[in-house]
Image (cartoon, rainbow, N blue to C red):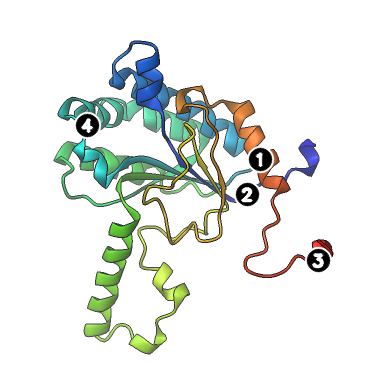
Amino acid sequence: MENELKIPSHVGIIVDGNGRWAKARELSRSKGHEFGFQNLQKLTTYMYRKGIKYISAYLFSTENFKRSDNEVNFIMNNLLVGRLKEILEFCHKEQIKALFSGRHEKLSAKVLKAMDQIETETKDYRERIFNICFNYGSHAEIVDATKKIVEDVQSGKLKINDLDEKIFSKYLYQQLPPVDLLIRTSGEQRISNFMLWQCSYAEFYFPKTLFPDFKAEDFDEALIEYTKRDRRFGGISYENESN
């Protein structure tokens, strides 16, 4: 089956279930995020070695600021700023280009500095792209893209009648191909404002496994399921026309 697997180019992951994983073990939610952080490194390493080129991970949404200050501060200061050296070492070891997608508002100066350092130090890698969706929301991304388009039309840089889907895509946070496979762990069956434009023809996979427990073999199951899917992009698969 290994040689017959279809390998998606771009995989999106909605990292979900860290808090419930910790609660089930009578640990703090912060501990859940810590174990999720550790698992994300192991999982992405495996995914790239399977042939995935682009990974977009939903790590912190614009709505996550509604959570407790302790939880938000742990994610911002402990897992991003506090683990900066570890993140950079990992990216250099695996030769990963890291990108950040999301709004900068509400983020502290030290968080923005860490994000900038990660992007700057990994910018020359080309084969493996890791898109970190942080303070991200797809509605916000589309609104921000629309504002940039309006500015360019008003300044004469863009003719309104030249605007099409291809040009609109260039105004999104990153220039990445569409998502082929979207995985949301923990059993929740919704995409929660994640890459709505980019996921228009993605295959969705909703395993019940909480993210800290989502291992290499679980990703292999996702690939097996993805391989079974008939991706028609609005057309007809003539091989199955009789069905």
Q: Rounded to the nearest whole Å, what is the CA distance between mark 3 and mark 2? A: 24 Å
Q: Position of residue 139 (x, y in %)?
A: 31, 59
Q: Secondary structure at mark 1?
A: helix
Q: 211 and 94: which one is in front? A: 211
* Residue 32 vs residue 84, the one in the foreground: 32
Q: CA gap, disc 4 to disc 2?
A: 32 Å
Judged by depth in the image, the label closer to the viewer, 3 or 2, is: 3
Q: Tell me, for residue 134, which label it has, or none.
A: none
Of the two numbered discs 2 and 1 on the same chain, state the one appearing first in sequence: 2
Residue identified by numbered label 3:
241
- Extreme residue in the top direction: 26
At numbered mark 4, what does the secondary structure look like: helix, strand or loop?
A: helix
C-alpha separation, residue under disc 3 versus residue under disc 4: 51 Å
Secondary structure beneath disc 2? Answer: loop
Looking at the rendered structure, the kind of residue marked 2 is Pro
Give coordinates of residue 49: x percent, y percent: 62, 36
Residue where numbered disc 4 is placed = 72
Using the image, tell me which numbered label, if any, was put on residue 8. 2
Label 4 to label 1: alpha-carbon separation:
32 Å
The amino acid type of the residue labelled 3 equals Glu
Whether tag 2 and tag 1 are in contact, CB under 8 A, the answer is: yes
Question: Which callout, 4 or 1, points at the residue further toward the start of the chain?
Answer: 4
Residue 21 image-quadrant placement: top left
Please tell me which residue is depicted at 15% across the width and 41% down the height of the picture.
109
Q: Residue at x 34, y 86 (%)?
A: 160
> Which mark is first along the chain, 2 or 3?
2
Give the residue pinned by disc 1. Answer: 223
